[in-house]
Amino acid sequence: MLAPIALFVHSRLDHTERTVSALQQNMLAQRTPLYIFSDGARDDNVGERLAVNAVREYLKSITGFLSVEIIERSENLGLKRNILDGLNSVTTQYDSVIVIEDDCVTSSDFLQYMNHQLAAFKCDETVWHIASWSPGLNVEGDIYRSHFMSCWGWATWSECWKKLNLDAYDLMRRMSIRDRYRFNLSNTYPFFSHLVGNFLGQNNTWAIYWAATVFTNGGFCINPVKTRLTNVGMDGSGSHKVQRMPQETDMTTPHGMGRVVTDPYVHDELQKKLHSLLKFRERLFMWLKMLFPVKAYKLIYRFKEGIGRC
């Protein structure tokens, strides 16, 4: 059986329609179960409630998949809780899962690519995550193995997902300074800073926990040289501020799936692209947060807790 799709939606009808339409054009769609987790509206937002209802009306019309199951949340869980609860549910029923949010427009061979990689790396215990998005690298080959984790259209196995660690402090303390540097992809992108932000309550995201779980368990991600996905949600319509990433608009040309990149410069090119996205201030704080003692973060956390009680 092919891996099911877990699709997470909220109040963006246009984005959702584009995402579903692209999935329907995949040749494997009719053999793929689709689970849709529709988050509820916030009680004090009438406009959002109308938008959520409009999305749910559209969801009832979706065809073209092996099956379609819609899970309507009675309250607003937020993206983090909706995704965690949804994936916990799906991974109790299946060995693997393909994860999509409502702003991810996929290529026509997306499902073929994801199922191919899930099968190819099923017995490789060092691979935890299959990504479909890439900034586009000018190297020979189809896929490369990296600590870089993209959550825009991805897949994993239930045995890996069961090991998700939601304790930010535990994840932080498991990393030496050298590990933090590697987790930050040689300090070209502030992944460790995102983990710190969640620990201190400055952020409330989910993907960084998964990225850190994979990393601290010695796991790797399989990434495509050519992207199978374009993110159309970087228009201010989402719940969270997102880092603008380079996007490829032409995904009509099918690409290979199995040739592993042997070019030693693939990671250098990736890191240069990521590093170019950061401003000087962001680079400075990335270094400071990486070098700051983890125990000191705990003191800051306790201080903030004490202030909150006053």
Image: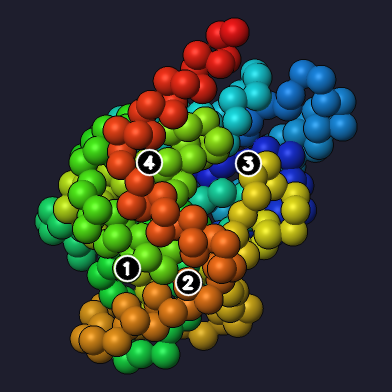
Residue ID at (32%, 78%):
267
Q: Earlier in the sequence, mark 3 or mark 4?
A: 3
Q: Nearer the viewer, mark 4 or mark 2?
A: 2
- Say what secondary structure mark 4 lies in: helix
Q: Nearer the viewer, mark 4 or mark 1?
A: 1
Measure the C-alpha gap from mark 4 to mark 2.
Answer: 20 Å
- Say what secondary structure mark 2 lies in: helix
- Say what secondary structure mark 1 lies in: loop
Q: x%, y% of residue 158?
A: 27, 40
Label ID, residue 209: 4
Measure the C-alpha gap from mark 1 to mark 3.
Answer: 34 Å
Residue ID at (42%, 41%):
196
Q: x%, y% of residue 290?
A: 36, 52
Q: Earlier in the sequence, mark 2 or mark 3?
A: 3
Q: Quadrant of the C terminus?
A: top right
Residue at far top of view: 310
Picture layout, residue 77 above or below residue 147: above
Q: Earlier in the sequence, mark 4 or mark 1?
A: 1
Image position of 92 (left or right of 131): left
Q: x%, y% of residue 222?
A: 30, 66
- Say what secondary structure mark 3 lies in: strand
Residue ID at (56%, 9%):
309
Q: Mark 2: few, some, or many residues within 10 Å (few <14, many ≥20)? A: some
Which residue was labeled with disc 3? Answer: 9
Q: Nearer the viewer, residue 275 or 294?
A: 294
Residue ID at (35%, 46%):
292
Which residue was labeled with disc 1? Answer: 186
Label ID, residue 274: 2
- C-beta proximity under 8 Å, tags 2 and 3: no
